[in-house]
Amino acid sequence: MSSKTILLSTAYLPPVHYMSALLSADKIIIEAHETYLKQTYRNRCVILSANGPLPLVIPVIKPKGNHTGITEVIIDYSTGWNRNHWRAIESAYRTSAYFEFIADVLKPFYSNPFNTLWEFNNELLKAILDFLELPVNINFTSTFHKVEPEGVMDLRYAISPKAKMPETSLHAILPYFQVFEHRFGFTPNLSIIDLLFNEGLMARDILRIKDKG
């Protein structure tokens, strides 16, 4: 079987499909030279609250306006978003089976400020992979390729709040238990923390359910 290289954008608490794609690859590359795009998973995630899916958005400052590179985007803490996000996460998942374990991993990121979105996202992703005990090696682009590089599955724009996930490109995720499933039914492709809070380390098997095919 030939090796698979996947190109991803940075993401805030990435959706389940992002993590499944990441874990299915032999080599993972995260785009470090793109211009920041708004209204994407780069600075937002979606959790399942008592009122349904809830987007959590990190407010950012773009020092160079629309020409700001992804590594230069600054997190704006003036709104107190970090406290609000943590309250929303606590409210949504405090009754979940693995709340205490996952809260210990996540809470420091809402107490200790980071300067850039790039650093925040990367450190948060690393913490999640460490919790899952998955030794994943993340690489970063050395230059920007507007067109999909040869031999690379380019998911920088495919994994988006506005895009329907292509089943031929990403692994289908079997339904798992969700805190508010009795109200809304199973809600697919939420933030990875929804899966972690509800399934703990079993998330590894759920994310890689079709990885052996």
Image (cartoon, rainbow, N blue to C red):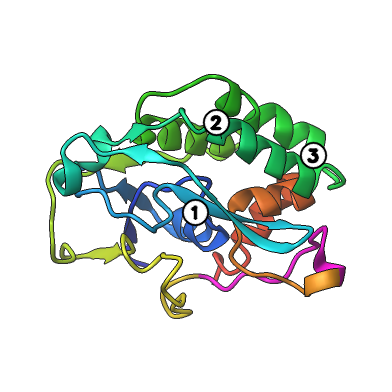
Name the residue: 41% across, 35% down: 122
Residue 128, by quadrant, is top right
> Spatial distance from mark 3 to mark 1, Cα to Cα?
23 Å
| Kind of element beneath mark 1 | helix
Which secondary structure type mostly characterizes the magenta part of the structure? Answer: loop
Name the residue: 12% across, 45% down: 143
Quadrant the C terminus occupies = bottom right
- The answer to whether residue 132 is visible is no
How far from the left and from the top, in percent, is residue 185? 78, 75
Answer with mark 3 or mark 1, whichever residue precedes in sequence.
1
Residue identifier under label 1: 23
Q: Which residues are magenta?
A: 171-182
User: Could you tell me the amino acid type at mark 3?
Assistant: Phe
Answer with mark 2 or mark 3, whichever residue precedes in sequence.
2
Name the residue: 80% across, 62% down: 177
Q: Are marks 2 and 3 in contact (CB under 8 Å)?
A: no
How far from the left and from the top, in percent, is residue 91? 78, 44
Residue 63, by quadrant, is top left
Residue identifier under label 3: 99
Residue identifier under label 2: 80
| Kind of element beneath mark 2 | loop
